[in-house]
Image: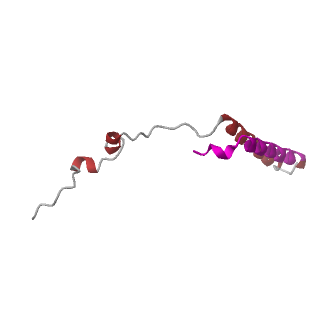
Amino acid sequence: MTEQAASGITAGVAGNTGAHGLDAQTGVSYEHEGHHGRPASWVAVSIIIIGFVVGGIAMVPSPRWWLFWTGAGIVVIGGIMAAAAHILDDWY
């Protein structure tokens, strides 16, 4: 059998690309990154979620429309806050 030209990769390194293999050799870090977004954006999203929860609770077991519309108003207020905080600019 003829010898084949080697690609330069040793047999032990080629299959080991995990955290202690090739990634560790190249310096790639897989540490947990922080959550994206600013605190104002998270507050706006929390207010929107609270509005949805209030609106959902208003529908169980029979619709209480005043509470539903209160929840809808909370969602609108959260949406306005999100727009004012430029929440769509948080994507990076």
Query: Magenta-highlighted stretch: main secondary structure?
Result: helix
Left or right of 2? Residue 88 is right
Left or right of 58? Residue 24 is left
Left or right of 14? Residue 60 is right
Out of 82 and 15, give the one closest to the viewer. Answer: 82
> Is residue 48 in view?
no
Q: Position of residue 25 (x, y in %)?
A: 31, 40
Q: Which residues are magenta?
A: 66-92
Q: Residue at x 27, y 50 (%)?
A: 14
Q: Is residue 88 magenta?
A: yes
Point out the residue furthest to the right here. 66
Q: Residue at x 63, y 43 (%)?
A: 90
Name the quadrant of the N terminus: bottom left
Q: Position of residue 77 (x, y in %)?
A: 80, 42
- What is the total number of numbered labels drawn onto the structure image? 0
> Is residue 4 in view?
yes
Q: Position of residue 12 (x, y in %)?
A: 23, 47
Point out the residue furthest to the bottom here. 1
Name the quadrant of the C terminus: top right
